[in-house]
Amino acid sequence: MWLTERFVGSPFSTCPLQFMSDHPSSPLPAARGARQKGAHESQFRLLSQRRFAPFFWTQFLGAMNDNVFKIGFTSLVTYQAARFSGVDPKTAAFLISAIFILPFVLLSATSGQIADKYDKAMLTRFVKSFEIVVMLIGGAGFLLHSAPLLYLCTFLMGVHSTVFGPVKYSYLPQHLSNQELVGGNGMVEMGTFVAILIGTIIGGASAGFVEHGALVLACACVAIALAGRAVSGFVPTTAAPQPDLRINWNPFSETWRNLKLARENRTVFLSLLGISWLWFVGATFLSSFFSFAKDVLSANPDVVTVLLGTFSIGIGLGSLLCEKLSKRRIEIGLVPLGSIGISVFAIDLFFASHALPPAGHLLSVGEFLARAAHWRVLADLFLLAMFGGFYSVPLYALIQSRSRPSHRARIIAANNILNSLFMIVSALMAVGLTAAGFGIPAIFLVTALLNIVVATYIYSLVPEFLLRFVAWMLVHTFYRIRLVHAERIPEEGAAVLVCNHVSFVDAVVIMAESPRPIRFVMDHQIFKMPLAGWIFRHAKAIPIAPAHQDAQLLTRAYERCAQALAEGELVCIFPEGKLTRTGDMNPFRHGVTEIIRRTPAPVIPMALRGLWGSVFSRADDARWPRPVQKGVMSRLTLAVGEPIDPALATPELLQQTVTELRGARK
């Protein structure tokens, strides 16, 4: 199955993002200069560069080979079970997945240490050489129709992917800049699923040859492994982030240590659980495809290729769209959108499966596509996969951007361990539900409903996901935002953001366009409003009040701002202290001066243009956002100025700077 490669990535994504652009271990200083020059060029240009192309084609061929083998194996034991003694075709796919997962439970902790200690190019070539040996064993299993040999090959493939997983995730950040990582990993994701599609076609077509299918599969697997090893020879040297690391060979104690490392950051750990849940969902669906095609769709093995191809294209497209939807930054607001889409289309797939007309024989691809009801099934699979891409890309980005570089591979190892456990539970659940009389559509429905429960639980623990989703939806539903020098908002370190106050959604707009969380300083009255209060409390906004209303609250607000800045966070304040009633700026107050007096930090002036007159403002003729010129949404601008030294940041200078940034447009 495609799940083989996904342990090198994820069921829906392989997108590690937002690392230090100039990693100290990067061996390519010249390439780093080229990164900045091409930061806004097409992501496809990376295919012409050595720092990316050999790695891309190495993982591409690995994904293809995994699927040639697993689709061929699964197809043979499902449709030609008589040739494999002692194999139950109804549970074979789940068993294959479970065997593949086992090495991740046993060896992930060790693999994470190895990836942090050794050159990743050397490790890549080692695992590709190992792949040749594995595929020779698999080829013998095909030729001899030996299920034990093929199961052994499946286990060894799991070992291969266990070692390569942390290598893969820690390679790209050392060769791509922050701006390139979204597109670069989108390319890897797209390439992976194109490879999955090609491997699915080759594996399914080869297994379809009744007389010579085993020989074709054996030759194809070995040939692709040889090609992958040849390409890996061009992967550039990638220095180890911690070459002096002493490896703990005890998998149990190291596994526990890795999980403790992951738990140091609560958001990272819960994001790991979120990704592992996606593996649960992906494993359940994709391990069911052969039985779904045969028992529900009444289709032959070629239709499985159509299903997997549709799924793969959906994931690939969703992954590529992430760069555009996220504006080349980590946008975790896409995560709730993805989880909603997964459940909606999985539930519809259940109903679509019950609306199928009966078939008296196994349908060919042409017969399957000729029935309109089947197009609904394909649409559900495509959209479910696309939203899965929206879900996983930002989660991987969040994990890797907030993990310490020296421990990054071991955090990925912890993720692999959790993924393994979740997929084992997925296989056990599927086998148990099947034994209890549940059909494949019912298993899909149970998984979709569980997805709603799990997503709700995770978002309740980490409201940042839901807040970013609300902000992202608002901004992308009503407005088209033009950013001016948004790169001046620092990606790390403390800073105080100051902005004009035009509308009730100013903070939401800024939140949506910031590359990282912001602690907003808000009037305490806002926290008494049901919806706004809930949003800003969970966004860790800091309530403030004038001294004549609540002097103690004012003091606590300044103390919380000082603490946030001391911890390296962004703090945003609207120095006017109230919404404008005329569209013109009110005089800036001294609150920002008090904040930076306690904890000096750079002050970043910002200005919003275009919100005055909207229904969210206090204009007398306030209206809903409406089209501007030829666009379909109202046009806003967020302009960011040069950082100002805290010693020079007087209210008068800040107001003058913000006024110039805003210009004549309110």
Image (spheres, helix red, strand yellow):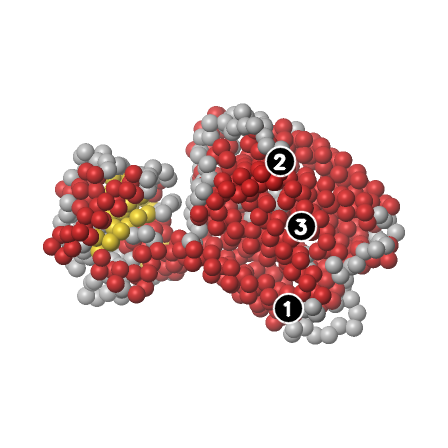
Three-letter amino acid code of the residue under disc 2: Asn
Q: Is residue 22 visible?
A: yes
Q: Between 69 and 549, which is closer to the camera in this rendering?
A: 549
The local crowd at label 1, few if under 14, some if 14 to 19, many if 20 or more residues have their Cα within 10 Å, is some
Left or right: 639 with respect to 186?
Answer: left
Q: Which residue is mark 2?
A: 250
Q: Is residue 503 above or below residue 18?
A: below
Q: Nearer the viewer, residue 503 or 268?
A: 268
Mark 3 crowd level (few <14, some 14–19, many ≥20, 10 Å Cα):
many
Distance from the alpha carbon under mark 1 to that under mark 3? 22 Å
Residue 469 screen position, x and y as percent:
41, 57
Query: Label 1's element?
Result: helix
N-term-proximal mark, 1 vs 3: 3
- Label 3 – label 2 distance at C-alpha: 30 Å
Residue type at mark 3 is: Trp
Measuring from the top left, give residue 594's x and y in whole percent. 18, 42
User: Which residue is disc 3 drawn over?
Assistant: 2
Which residue is pictured at 19% across the width and 48% down the height?
A: 555
Element type at mark 3: loop
Query: Residue 483 appears at what percent x and percent y?
Result: 34, 46
Residue 471: x and y, percent?
A: 37, 56
Taking the spot 22% from the left edge, 56% from the top edge, the residue there is 523
The residue under label 1 is 442
- The secondary structure type at the circle numbered 2 is loop
Judge left or right: residue 532 versus residue 149.
left
Q: Label 2 crowding class (10 Å Cα cut-off): few <14, some 14-19, many 20+?
A: few
